[in-house]
């Protein structure tokens, strides 16, 4: 919206980076294939005529309606990637750091903990690496050029985002923080509550990790923070995107307020 480039380092089928590049009208991907080769591909996308409000409205629709949106950014933009990436990617790449310079060229970087070698999840009900433990205990599961990454991060404005309104946050989680298996509402409540508790640790864990390497940062509240901190010329009103990540089936939405009240009483 502001013509700035964004690198989003994420992993669902494996760890990779998506770069949104309005300056040259591309969306790009970097990943490591099963033969440990670094791969790159891109596609042409127009950023100069996007209907932002229309995009957000369509992104709030159910998947089967969302996928037919006329707005390319609305069509499952967060998790759709090239088929060649999905078919040939390693889950824990140890040489992706060789193209970190491409990520650091971007104006904004999301999930920068990967740049320090931290990789995991914030879903404590899953077996495997827990991100909070990794950040707090300095468990770096990825090979990186640590000195290079520290040096680059020290040159940037680093922002740790946190949430003050826990009830509001819990609403987002119960709407979009898990999959309902069958009609087991009690299991769903327990799983999502567990994930909320883990997510509530995340900003503190990130502070510990950045303090460890003397990387400066600022704290910013999703509920009361001034968006000027990001240097935007154009902006959306607060909570404009609320409801855009709903997974819970609509016929169960009436349960959300009940789950929120229970959660806050159990985990104040």
Image (cartoon, helix red, strand yellow):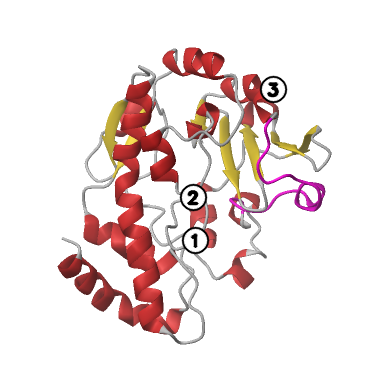
Residue nearer the viewer, 28 or 231: 28
Q: Earlier in the sequence, mark 1 or mark 3?
A: 3
Callout 1 crowding tier (Cα within 10 Å): few <14, some 14–19, many ≥20: few
State whether residue 129 is above or below residue 160.
Answer: below
Quarter holding the C terminus is bottom left
Residue under pointer 3:
98
Give the Cα distance between marks 3 and 2.
Answer: 23 Å
Q: Quick check: 11 left or right of 27?
A: left
Q: Quick check: 52 left or right of 216?
A: right
Q: Disc 3, disc 2: CB below 8 Å?
A: no
Circle 2 SS class: loop
Boundaries of the magenta span: 77-94
- State yes or no: residue 112 in magenta: no
Give residue 126's mark. Answer: 1
Give the Cα distance between marks 1 and 2.
Answer: 8 Å
Callout 2 crowding tier (Cα within 10 Å): few <14, some 14–19, many ≥20: some
Residue 179: give x, y in percent of width and height.
Answer: 50, 72
Q: Disc 1, disc 3: CB below 8 Å?
A: no
Look at the image and tell me whether residue 67 can be seen: yes
Instruction: Characterize the magenta stretch by its predominant secondary structure.
Output: loop
State whether residue 121 is above or below residue 67.
Answer: above
Circle 3 SS class: helix
Q: Disc 1, disc 2: CB below 8 Å?
A: yes
Residue under pointer 2:
121
Q: Quick check: 37 left or right of 124?
A: right
Q: Quadrant of residue 48?
A: top right
Picture residue at 35% right of the left edge, 63% below the top:
194
State whether residue 173 is above or below residue 225.
Answer: below
Q: Quadrant of residue 232?
A: top left
Q: Earlier in the sequence, mark 3 or mark 2?
A: 3
């Amino acid at each position: 919206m502001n013509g700035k480039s964004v690198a989003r380092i994420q992993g669902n089928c494996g760890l990779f980076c998506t770069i949104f590049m309005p300056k040259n009208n591309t969306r790009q991907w970097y990943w490591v294939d099963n033969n440990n080769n670094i791969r790159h591909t891109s596609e042409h996308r127009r950023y100069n005529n996007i209907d932002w409000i229309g995009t957000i409205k369509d992104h709030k629709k159910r998947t089967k309606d969302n996928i037919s949106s006329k707005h390319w950014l609305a069509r499952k933009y967060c998790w759709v990637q090239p088929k060649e990436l999905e078919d040939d990617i390693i889950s824990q790449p140890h040489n992706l750091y060789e193209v970190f310079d491409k990520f650091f060229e971007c104006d904004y970087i999301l999930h920068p903990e990967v740049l320090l070698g931290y990789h995991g999840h914030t879903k404590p009900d899953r077996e495997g690496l827990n991100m909070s433990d990794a950040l707090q205990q300095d468990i770096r599961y990825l090979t990186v050029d640590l000195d290079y990454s520290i040096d680059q991060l020290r040159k940037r404005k680093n922002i740790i985002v946190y949430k003050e309104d826990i009830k509001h946050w819990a609403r987002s989680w119960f709407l979009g923080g898990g999959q309902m298996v069958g009609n087991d509402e009690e299991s769903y409540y327990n799983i999502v509550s567990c994930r909320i508790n883990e997510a509530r640790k995340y900003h503190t864990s990130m502070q510990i990790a950045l303090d460890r390497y003397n990387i400066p940062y600022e704290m910013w509240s999703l509920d009361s923070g001034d968006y000027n901190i990001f240097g935007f010329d154009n902006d959306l009103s607060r909570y404009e995107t609320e409801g855009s990540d709903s997974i819970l089936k609509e016929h169960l939405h009436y349960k959300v307020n009940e789950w929120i009240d229970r959660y806050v009483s159990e985990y104040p």
